[in-house]
Image: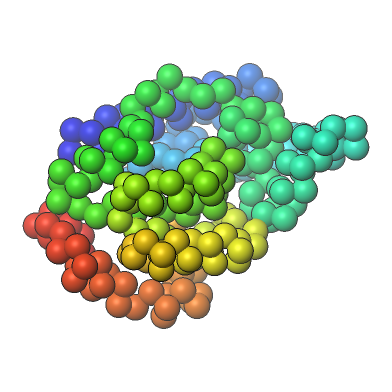
Amino acid sequence: VEHLQKLESSRVDRMKHMVEHLQSIGFKISISDVQAAAGDSIIGSPHIVKAVQKHPENLALEKELLAKMKEQAKTSEDVKAKFEQMVEAGIVQYPYRLYMKASSFIPMPRAESYTALLSLEDSVDLIHQAGGVAVLAHWYFHTTIFKAARLEEAVGAGKLDGLETSTDNTTFDGDVTSEVEMLRRLIEKYQLAEVMGSDSHSVEDLAAFAKGPNAELSVGHTQKIIDKFKPNLEWSNF
């Protein structure tokens, strides 16, 4: 509980840092815009994007950045690769690939509050100490910083209990078929738990998951986790 409170506080600090940076590159956005977008939810990147896109002038700036990136892609292999990956991921990913991440076309400087994040090993230890099961979510969103070889090394060393395979993410349209197949091979090879997710940030996200094929495929996964790991259910939302 103490660690989650630190993380929640760090998300607010991160949001303020991101708002300041977005203002510095010309976007019209305020802390109150983001708070209104988040409502009672824990503040995340989708809320910041929503706050940005509520102002028409920001949409015009997004188009300018997109045109600038497309032009630079003609002379830079690095920008070209990022541009092609962004197009493949779909239009809902454009803000993240253009200006919301450290790896974006316009890099988002990392906030000091990121120090609240734990290493993979410490995160798993904390989960296990709390009687939980440690599952890595949507790995294919983070392949540049957590490469496939490192992932297999982690699961091979017993540092993870399971992997999330398919995810019905409403902000990502990319084809991750090959990545999901690799994850399922690791699950079978190392006898891990498989889960599927919605990566939900809203009621609409859950509705999209319910309509997709993964909802039916996921039936029974929770019971398999309980049977396999016998986690402490006293504090669980299972």
Residue 68 position, x and y percent, is: 83, 33
Q: What's the residue at 63%, 33% (across, down)?
A: 103
In the rendered image, is residue 46 in sight?
Answer: no
**Location of the C terminus (image quadrant):** bottom left
Residue 2 position, x and y percent, is: 18, 33
Left or right of residue 98: residue 159:
left
Q: How many marks?
A: 0
Left or right of residue 48: residue 119:
left
Q: What's the residue at 90%, 37% (across, down)?
A: 74
Q: Nearer the viewer, residue 90 or 204?
A: 90
Query: Residue 101 lies in what quarter of the image?
Result: top right
Q: Nearer the viewer, residue 29 or 96?
A: 96
In the rendered image, is residue 105 in sight?
Answer: yes
Query: Residue 21 lies in what quarter of the image?
Result: top right
Q: Nearer the viewer, residue 112 or 221?
A: 221
**Location of the N terminus (image quadrant):** top left
Residue 63 position, x and y percent, is: 78, 40
Query: Residue 174 lies in what quarter of the image?
Result: bottom right
Q: What's the residue at 47%, 36% (across, down)?
A: 34
What colouring method underlies this structural image?
rainbow
Q: Nearer the viewer, residue 234 or 36?
A: 234
Q: What's the residue at 61%, 63% (across, down)?
A: 178
Residue 112 position, x and y percent, is: 43, 19
